[in-house]
Amino acid sequence: MFFIAGITVVTSIQLVGILLISALFVIPNVTAIMYRRGFKQTVLVSISFAVFSVVTGIILSYVFDITPSGAIVLLLIAIFAATLGIKSTGLIAKLTA
């Protein structure tokens, strides 16, 4: 299992770059953790953020003729910033209670 994950990471780094892989590992997870749910919900929210960012980033990169990895990372950062703003207002605490 770990061998397959290692091959996937190495191949992905060569294809889309270190920036995208690092962002896809860290930003969705940190964003999902802010919602303070259980492990299973955190994993599902993190996967949802990552898949949404990848699909939307690829579509936006095609429409605006920009690099896909940059668009994906900017979307991930936007989702993180929005979540951080919502958390600072206290709305996440009300939603998760």
Image: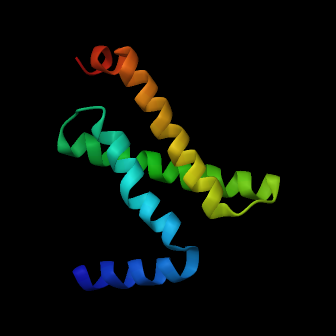
Which residue is most to the left?
Answer: 38
- To which quarter of the image does residue 68 belong? bottom right
The residue lying at 48 percent from left, 78 percent from top is 13
The residue lying at 33 percent from left, 41 percent from top is 32
92 sits to left or right of 65: left
The residue lying at 61 percent from left, 63 percent from top is 69
Q: State whether residue 20 is above or below residue 26.
A: below
Q: How many marks?
A: 0
| Colour logic | rainbow
82 sits to left or right of 93: right
Residue 37 pos. (x, y %): 22, 34
Residue 89 pos. (x, y %): 39, 15
Residue 28 pos. (x, y %): 40, 49
Residue 84 in view in this figure: yes
Residue 79 pos. (x, y %): 50, 38
The residue lying at 28 percent from left, 40 percent from top is 33
